[in-house]
Amino acid sequence: MRFSLQREALLKPLAQVVNVVERRQTLPVLANLLVQVNAGVLSLTGTDLEVEMIARTGLEADAEDGETTIPARKLFDIVRALPDGSRITVTVSGDKAVVQAGRSRFSLATLPANDFPSVDEVDATERASVPEAALKELIDRTAFAMAQQDVRYYLNGLLFDLRGDILRCVATDGHRLALCEAGLADGAGLKRQIIVPRKGVQELQRLLEGGERVLELQLGRSHIRVTRDDATFTSKLIDGKFPDYEAVVPIGADKLVTLDREVLRAALQRVAILSNEKYRGVRLEVTPNQLQISSHNPEQEEAQEEVEAETKVDDLTIGFNVTYLLDALSALRDEKVVLALRDANSSALLREASNERSRHVVMPLRL
């Protein structure tokens, strides 16, 4: 096997697959990438048996077909360290792969391609097409709310909720919830909920670039596959039932406070400096046309900010974890945001003023 291409053309697909490879493996071959050359196309595959990423790139005429596995991190680090514009040639003979560029030459140990595990074939029970920019936006606006190593294992991932021609992504860690939805071009009649594990979500988020390309989603019984012209992402699903998130979205939160998103975010960041480091609590006091934000800590230090608000609400005080509010504001895009409240003990809903496509629920904090 032999192939040759520019450094930048090799670095991009390598970067897409190398993060899937775990630094600590149970099988030596899992530290390697499966490298295949076939009919002028170079294909690189990385897997940890839960998530598989395949990246493809075209080659010029002088490539020789073949396959092997090469140490993932070492190959990536070598290519990244070579000068810009280098032409890299990889030649495999026996159990060695030789990487050459200019006066640089590296010899790497390989393992047989037959030893490389393949993720089970996805028997797609549902298929849908979604614009890449839309899927990227859904994940960017919700993934931060996923739980980390929660005993409720079904919270350690992102819910994909397909409902006819709408795809919703939902994440919650039990203290806050993020929801965003987008239209599907050809999802008529689909009704399915799946939970993609945290690592799969992060790899998919890293892969997506936005833009006009349309991705194909294939949903199997225990896998999801996302296919793009130059890459294929496959992940096992979390086998569990996601909580009824619609029951968490507050109903009857009729006390509305409309605020400038950037002004509110800057005020919260300043007040957070003197909040309790453990609980990160801030107090919000709503009066007509004004929101007062305050915090204090065990050292008896205090911070206070006043923000203009469009509201008729009089005398409502509620506490929140400031990190959850800031995360939600970072995920929203509109200039104006609406904070919908019911009372001091009920969850708050934060959304954009112009639409309800993206919604964030934050539990209150007793201060």
Image (spheres, rainbow, N blue to C red):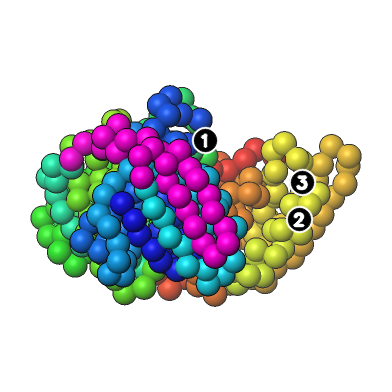
- Decide which of 52, 162 is in the foreground and name it: 52
Q: Residues within 10 Å of mark 2 (few under 14, many from 20)?
A: many
Numbered mark located on residue 275 in the image = 3
Residue under the point 43% across and 73% down: 354
Q: CA distance from mark 3 to mark 1?
A: 37 Å
Q: Nearer the viewer, mark 3 or mark 1?
A: 1
Amino acid identity at mark 2: Val
Residue 293 visible in rendering = yes
Picture coordinates of residue 343 (x, y %)?
54, 48
Q: Residues within 10 Å of mark 1 (few under 14, many from 20)?
A: few
- Examine the rendered structure and indicate whether residue 91 appears above or below residue 238: below
Numbered mark located on residue 8 in the image = none
- Decide which of 42, 334 is in the foreground and name it: 42
Magenta residues, start to end: 93-121
Picture coordinates of residue 75 (x, y %)?
49, 49
Q: Nearer the viewer, mark 2 or mark 1?
A: 1
Q: Are marks 3 and 2 in contact (CB under 8 Å)?
A: yes
Q: Secondary structure at mark 3?
A: loop
On the image, numbered disc 1 is attached to which residue? 23
